[in-house]
Image (cartoon, rainbow, N blue to C red):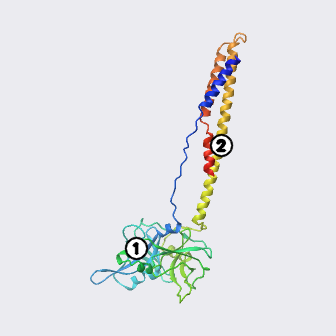
Amino acid sequence: MRRLIASILMALMVLAGGTAIAQSDDGKGAQEQAQQNDVVRASRSVVRVALIGTDSNGNAFFLGHGSGVVIADGYVLTNHHVIEPLQNMGGTMIMIVPSEGDEGFQGQVVDSDPRADLALITTRRGVVRPLPIFTGTPEPTARVAALGYPGNVDLAENLSVDDRVTPLAAVRTFGQLSGGRSRRDVDTLLHTAAIARGNSGGPLVDECGRVIGITSFGAITEGVDAEFGFAVSAREIIPFLRNESITPATTTDSCVPLAERERQAQEAEAEEQSLANRRLAESRQMYLVASVAMLVIGALLIGIGIVAFIYRARLKTKSIPGFVCMGLGLLLMIGSVVVFMQTPSLEDVADAEESET
């Protein structure tokens, strides 16, 4: 009997050892996702506000332009002084030219505020994504970007009139806030991002691409004096929009720069990978323990069944209990082999640890 039990155990252990296979790695693989800078993404919401006039013969001509930003679906925020010529001249129209696409769209002035130098224009909906407004208090020396269409760049690039009413990417210039000084009558932000004629009405954004102001004017400089710009702050923008029943997306969350967000995302991914590796190693241990336990219990049941079958006469029992024990034992041992085959291999664990490092 002992020889029979030993032979069965030996055969099952050889079978188990010979059928162990490495599980295929069904990892997600390297899925590279192109991440764009927040300011570049924000510039897609900037538009050129072109003023088009018509002569007595009905011929259209270019009067000038400013910049603007889509602040709600179908609504462009710009400066009052950008659209002011419309109030003094007849036969003029506004053309809203987005940074992307094939064409511009006609705009209509909803209202303007000469004091705050703000104007609201309605245009085609569903074309340009609105930008959120940061309504918190910017850091005194926060890094900022002025987005818009400076006229001197148009001249340097020798753009024709047709070019200026054709979708074109906005220009981005960077600087920082300079103490938050304001005009006496209007709450403005003082900054060092370079601006020029044509930038008027464009957004001043933080590193996260959120509007913190609307470019209004620049300081007059002489010689080598430093250049500064002024932007109408969100404290003026929000009441102006509310008066027109416009509710833009706003936030007071602190700006976490893209580089920091990427670092945090990498740390979170590494932590998640480490946790997955620990779970894989623990899973392997659990599978092995379960496989061994089933193997041992199955062997014991087979042994008990064999003893019960051999000594059924002496024990005054039928052969059924012995067969039942041997059957259950055999099933457990087969299950042990199946569980062992499902056990994560050492190669899987090693590969996971290598990917983590």
Q: What number is the disc on residue 281?
A: 2
Quarter of the image for residue 76 reads bottom left
Q: Dot 2 surroundings within 10 Å: few (below 14), some, or many (20 or more)?
A: some
Q: Give the image location of residue 8, x and y in percent.
A: 65, 22
Marks 1 & 2, CB-CB < 8 Å contact:
no
Q: Give the image location of residue 231, x and y in percent.
A: 53, 79
Q: What number is the disc on residue 96?
A: 1
Q: Is residue 160 left or right of residue 216?
A: left
Q: Dot 1 surroundings within 10 Å: few (below 14), some, or many (20 or more)?
A: many
Q: Give the image location of residue 282, x and y in percent.
A: 66, 42
Query: Regarding mark 2 in the picture, which secondary structure is present there?
Result: helix
Q: Is residue 318 left or right of residue 58?
A: right
* Residue furthest to the right: 314
| Residue shown at 67% from the left, 18% from the top | 4
Q: Is residue 332 visible?
A: no
Amino acid found under the numbered disc labelled 2 = Ala
Amino acid found under the numbered disc labelled 1 = Ile
Q: Is residue 352 above or below residue 258?
A: above
